[in-house]
Amino acid sequence: MWRHAIQVLLGCSMGKGNLIYKDTGKQAFSFFDRKNGKKGRIVFKRPLNPNFERQQLQEHILSAPLDELFDLKEPSFELPEEARIFTSVICEKCGESAPEHKMRLEEGKTVCIECAKAYSRGW
């Protein structure tokens, strides 16, 4: 859910390659501006009182100064190469579109991964 909010607020997306998601379990977000090379990392601080109930935590988050809620740092990794934009192709089974690199050729038809029959030799 947080990714959707960030995409709307900042105009970035994982598809464009300017929103990088690393599943680390942390509430930390790294941002890069490809045009000017600026980068930053926002890390959510745990509340000073670990015994907050849910309601207390919500009130704290909504009322505390930003520097109490977040640390500003430099990202510890470099920005990956710019995302490639692939042509969308229509699946000949379900009629939905998907990027061409996610399509399969099956019995002469172009099909999406979901419609493609799995193949395994059981090894």
Image: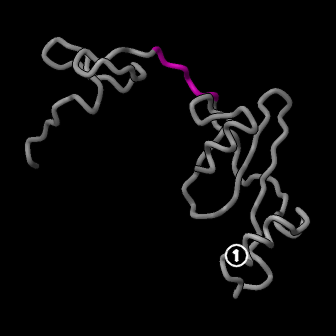
Q: How is the image coloured?
A: one colour
Q: Residues within 10 Å of mark 1 (few under 14, many from 20)?
A: few
Question: Which x, y percent locates residue 90?
Answer: 34, 15
Q: Nearer the viewer, residue 39 or 92?
A: 92
> Is 104 displayed left or right of 118 in the figure?
right
Residue 30 magenta: no
Question: Which x, y percent locates residue 22?
Answer: 58, 52
Q: Quadrant of residue 9?
A: top right
Residue carrying label 1? 55
From what the image shows, is residue 112 above or below residue 68? above
Question: Which x, y percent locates residue 123?
Answer: 10, 49
Q: How many marks?
A: 1
> Is 51 displayed left or right of 25 in the figure?
right
Question: Which x, y percent locates residue 118?
Answer: 17, 36
> Is 81 displayed left or right of 74 in the figure?
left
Task: Tell me which residue sits at (13%, 16%) in the image.
Answer: 107
Which residue ends up furthest to the left in the rendered image?
Answer: 121
SS at circle 1: helix
Which residue ends up furthest to the top in the rendered image?
Answer: 108
Task: Tell me which residue sits at (61%, 42%) in the image.
Answer: 4
Q: Nearer the viewer, residue 72 or 68?
A: 68
Q: Quadrant of residue 23?
A: bottom right
From what the image shows, is residue 53 above or below residue 115? below
Which residue ends up furthest to the bottom in the rendered image?
Answer: 51
From what the image shows, is residue 106 above or below residue 3? above
**Magenta segment, prevailing SS (helix, strand or loop):** loop
Looking at the rendering, the stretch of residues picked out in magenta corresponds to 82-87
Task: Tell me which residue sits at (30%, 17%) in the image.
Answer: 95
What amino acid type should be assigned to the residue bearing mark 1?
Gln
Task: Tell me which residue sits at (69%, 39%) in the image.
Answer: 79
